[in-house]
Image: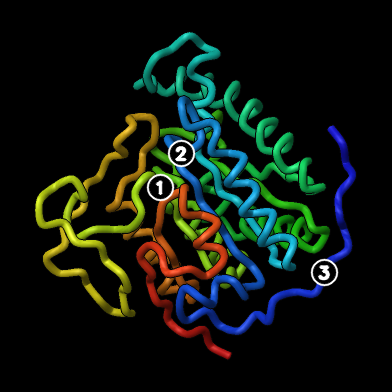
Amino acid sequence: MSTEGPLVTPARPDGAPVVDRAGIARARRIVVKVGSSSISGENVGQIEPLVDALADAYARGAEVVLVSSGAIATGLPHLRLDSRPTDLATQQAAAAVGQNVLIYRYQQSLRRHGIVAGQVLLTAGDMRDPTPRSNAQRAMDRLLELRILPIVNENDTVATHEIRFGDNDRLAALVAELIGADALVLLSDVDALYTRPPHEPGAVALVDVPVGDDLAGVTFGDAGAAGVGTGGAGTKVAAARHAAAAGTPVLVTSTANVALALSGAAVGTFFEAVPRAS
């Protein structure tokens, strides 16, 4: 693997607080989360346009962190499995194989832009306990200073059902909080959040969610449509609320819209954040 990459930080965006979608284009530190169904199986071809969008943000000086699901889903065909296993040991085996393949695919794509990836695998305990949490924060900050693009995932090979994040939407929100991200972009198969499952009659896209909006009357599904991930609209709302309460605004949109999202276009559902103390 080549270690060549631009380690000199270009002029950074202005870093002003992100108060709307347009501000994402000027954010200094951005966390992007992508789900299993968006980058595995028949959608593996979405990795390159995803990386292109991340590279565009990187090129304008942003510090970019990718939280990527997909280790288990990527490992399934290598274990000759057709669907996500239900037992923990086989999930861990699939993750061990799939994480290696997934990182290789990302690095091969990032190499086209001269960007080096750094793998960061976390457990729920790492984010809960002060010493591992501090170590993770220090490592992430240093990677970003060195112009490395961290790719974060839950360490599924050692995680247990009892002690785990449960979904990478939550992990992404915790990472955004950990590093003081200026914006969090949660990607899925759907272009925005809707007032009810988008295939149902009467579903209306949510455009903006102000601080304190309890989304009364809104109904969310809990499962991913492709059957390979663990997150749904409900988990994204919970993650967005957590990040927004910690001072990081959140945009929820589709993986196909990632370039538009990072350029500040009017896409997706935007969660306003509680202002950070100065």
Q: Amino acid at mark 2?
A: Ser
Residue denoted by label 3: 10
x and y percent of residue 99 in the render? 60, 30
Residue 38's disc is: 2
Q: Quadrant of residue 199?
A: top left
Q: Is residue 48 above or below residue 245?
A: above
Would you call the spot at circle 3 few (<14 residues within 10 Å), some (14-19), or many (20 or more)? few
Provide the secondary structure element on which disc 2 rests. Answer: helix
Would you call the spot at circle 1 few (<14 residues within 10 Å), some (14-19), or many (20 or more)? many
Badges 2 and 1: C-beta atoms under 8 Å apart? yes
Please name the residue shown 42% across and 72% down the image. 244
Q: Amino acid at mark 1?
A: Ser
Provide the secondary structure element on which disc 1 rests. Answer: strand
Distance, label 2 to label 1, CA atoms, is: 7 Å
Residue denoted by label 1: 188
Distance, label 3 to label 2, CA atoms, is: 30 Å
Provide the secondary structure element on which disc 3 rests. Answer: loop
